[in-house]
Amino acid sequence: MIAVKSFYKFLSSIWRKSPSIKERVITWRKGPVITRVENPTKLHRARELGYNAKQGFVIVRVRIKKGGRRRKKIRKGRKPKTRGRVRFTTQKSLKRIGEEKVARKYPNMEVLNSYFVAEDGQYKYFEVILVDRSHPAIKKDKKMKWITKQRRRALRGKTSEGRKNRGIR
């Protein structure tokens, strides 16, 4: 008997074996931090997270610098005793930071979800699925109508990554 894979499982197996991502990352590194993408790079993952190829859905790729973060500079007042530590580890994941960046760049859209695409020595790349909550196609869709009532989901930690970071799972 022949084992039959679904199309999306086939896509994910191809993605894992694909060497062409390295050339893509080189071109992505030279581009802007936040880039709108016509089609998802990992279609199988985008579909798992709720993406539909119809009006009102937008895919955006975001680039986040890897590693720890630096503390903000003190503007006025006394120096706290912990000021000697310049670097610190954030409690937010890089994926959540990327979702928040995209949410600020596209204020009329809501972040549905995001997924990891690639990484190199300096950056991690994520694709964020955005939904236009005021689009008529989204308002009519019974499965996606719920998002029209939500505001600023990524900034409040309501996406799946935000919930994971907040310890809600």
Image (cartoon, helix red, strand yellow):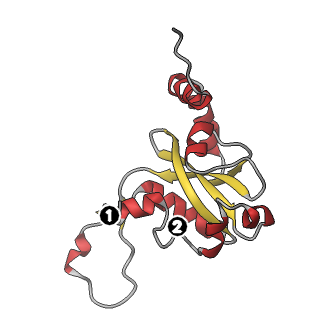
Label 2 crowd (10 A; few <14 / some 14-19 / many >=20): many
The residue furthest front is: 1
Say which quadrant the C terminus sits in: bottom left
For image coordinates 55% across by 22% down, the residue present is 5
Residue 151 falls in which quadrant of the image? bottom right
Rendered location of residue 168, percent (x, y) = 35, 64
- Dots 2, 1 in contact, CB < 8 A: no
The residue furthest left is: 81
The mark that comes first in sequence, 2 or 1, is 2
Q: Is residue 73 above or below residue 44?
A: below
For image coordinates 59% across by 28% down, the residue present is 11
Identify the mark at residue 167; answer none if there is no mark.
1
Q: Is residue 31 above or below residue 19?
A: below
> Where does label 2 land, which residue?
154
Which type of secondary structure does the marked residue at label 2 adopt?
Answer: loop
Rendered location of residue 125, percent (x, y) = 53, 46
Which callout, 2 or 1, points to the residue nearer the camera?
1
Residue 72 as seen in the image, left or right of residue 35: left
For image coordinates 49% across by 62% down, the residue present is 159
* Pick the front one: 85 or 53: 53
* Pick the front one: 169 or 28: 169
